Image (spheres, rainbow, N blue to C red):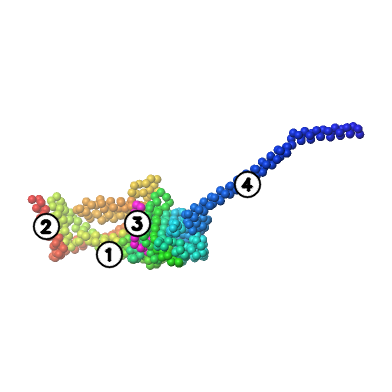
Amino acid sequence: MKNYDKNSLTGFVLMFLILLVFNFYFLPTNEEVSEKNDTIQKEDVITEDVIIKDNEIIDKKEQVTKKELEKKYGIFSKSADSEIQNYVLENEKIKVILSNKGGRISSVTIKEGPDKKKYKTYNGEDLKIFNSDSSLFNLNFSTGISINTSELFFKPTQISDEEISLRLDVDSSHFIDFSYKLNQDYLVDFNINLIGMNEIIPNELNFMNLQWQMKTPQTEKSKDNQDMYTGIYYQYFADKDDIDYLGYTTSDENEKIKNKISWVAMQQQFFSSILVAKNGLKNVKLSSKKEEFSNYVKDLSAEFEIKYNHDPYEKVEFQFYFGPNHYKQLQSYNINFEKIIPLGWGIFGWVNKYIIINIFDFLSKYFTNYGLIILLLTIIIKLALSPFTYKAYLSQAKMKVLKPEIDKINEKHKSKDPMKAQQETMSFYRKAGVNPMGGCLPMLFQFPILIAMFRFFPASIELRSEAFLWADDLSAYDSILDLPFEIPFYGDHVSLFTLLMTISTLLYTRMNTQMASGQMAQMKWMMYLMPVMFLGFFNNYAAGLSYYYFLANMFTFSQMFLMKRFVNEGALLQEIEENKKKPRKKSKFQKRLEEMQKMQEQKMKQKRR
């Protein structure tokens, strides 16, 4: 027990000494604890101050932004910041996307044509005639501050399958509504409703500006061809038949129109966007700019003035057409939309409107292969023109029979008196009863058809994306070989229909020049030059056009072959000999012509003296 007590006492003493040392050297004093507490409290205060200061910075930034918006947009500043939302109006024909930013139509997709034909781009994508990234629709007005609706966000007030209304408001009694209603086809009714804006817009301002702009995307195989048919058409308000245009040249164009216009069309090769104003548009500014190095063809824009009467409630009525350049469809609206299709002027346009289009539409009802339709169209046209072709061939046959006699006259006066040779030649023709122009006059009746077809095929949406034989699109060039380089004036590909057309035209030219004599014989090289020039020009043109011209040449060869079997040159020569024996009275024109020739001869003799 004594040992145990002794050990315990020793343990307690050691523990006491340890606690005493630890307390003296390691535990903080009261002053140190107090200083530490003061430091912690100060750090807490600093942290709280930093948080408060950060919130103040954020608040100040928001206040600055709010002030900037109020300065820029005034009473519309609350509509300057939101998230973009889209709304859709759609039927079987088109799909229209509306955006709450600007309350505008941001893109339009053309789905199908009047004939139920589905539309896609050449690459097989949805056919958008414009999109949100490359278009603008803006109403500009002043409240003392210039306001652009394209920068502000609208709120939907009515949404249905056929109609959407978007509102830009100040309050419940001061707002602007953009109302869109989709019809059954390609028309979209668009109304601007101005409610209570007379209390916001200064009294001295009696108009608003409407701005419409779009970059037209490349949707066709050939950008060059699409560029040729992309531009702006417009109709004057006072004269509905007065249609004008700009943007169809190689350079940029700008135009200011002081007269009021009814509608303006931003036309592409096969599709158009048309804005119609019920009460007309004044002080119009139009612009067309080429897009050389992008996926867009042209940048088209229009700016107008809209009259503002300062009424508590005003309604400005418009209508959009978003659809194909289909002649019958455009014609059905009875406001001359169809005139945007470049069918040619004068007689060439008449041939297309009243003959070619009607025949083409009739054949389209019974046949779906457009290569076959063009073949049948060619046969119909050539049969209708066959009487003129026969007269032309008969005249050429008579000239061929007389050619030996004409060559003798030319040889006789070859180096003496060309005027005398010409007089004797004309006299010989007159005695023989042959008109040297007889082969040309019938061709004048065929010429309008040739030019009309030249205008018709590149503008015919019916041929778009229609394949035939090796051509995958009759409205574009048909390439059987893509070249690794570009040949000047020709291109970087070989179009087989154009090649066949050129060869057949050269053969036809050779056939016609075999009977040429005199000066005409010296001009042969020019007649051969024209088909060669066509080779370069048509190489990038519509395959349907080259195909038609090739067929026309082949049918002409067939007609000449048949006519040759039924026209007896011996009988023609006998008829000509009998005509020589018959006395012929000179017409007044012939008498005057002979008098002029005699006067010319006398002048030549006087000069020689």
Q: Are marks 3 and 2 in contact (CB under 8 Å)?
A: no
Q: Which residues are magenta?
A: 245-265
Q: Amino acid at mark 4?
A: Glu
Q: Kindly report which numbered mark, 1 or 3, lies closer to the viewer in this rendering.
A: 3
Which residue is tagged 3? 255
Residue 508 horizontal side relative to residue 154, left or right = left
Along the horizontal axis of the image, is 266 left or right of 556? right
Q: Is residue 260 magenta?
A: yes
Q: Indicate the amino acid at tag 3.
A: Glu
| Dot 1 or dot 4, earlier in sequence | 4
Q: Residue at x 39, y 66 (%)?
A: 279
- Looking at the picture, tell me which residue is in the foreground, 558 or 443: 443
Residue designated by label 4: 48
Please give the count of numbered marks on the rendered protein: 4
Q: Is residue 311 visible?
A: yes
Q: Nearer the viewer, mark 3 or mark 4?
A: 4
Which of the two marks, 1 or 4, is nearer to us in this view? 4
Whichever of labels 3 and 2 marks the residue nearer the N terminus, that label is 3
Structural crowding at the residue carrying mark 3, measured as other residues with C-alpha within 10 Å and reported as few (<14), some (14–19) or many (≥20): some
Find out whether the residues at labels 3 and 4 contact each other: C-beta distance under 8 Å.
Answer: no
**Label 4's element?**
helix
Q: Mark 1 — residue?
A: 387
In terms of sequence position, does the residue under pointer 3 or pointer 4 come before the other?
Answer: 4
Residue 189 percent coordinates (x, y): 45, 65
Instruction: Say whether disc 1 or disc 3 marks the residue closer to the N-terminus.
Output: 3
Is 380 on the left-hand or right-hand side of 49? left
Q: Residue at x 10, y 51 (%)?
A: 607
Earlier in the chain: of badge 4 and badge 2, it is 4
- Res 599 label: 2
> Residue 48 or 379: which is nearer the viewer?
48
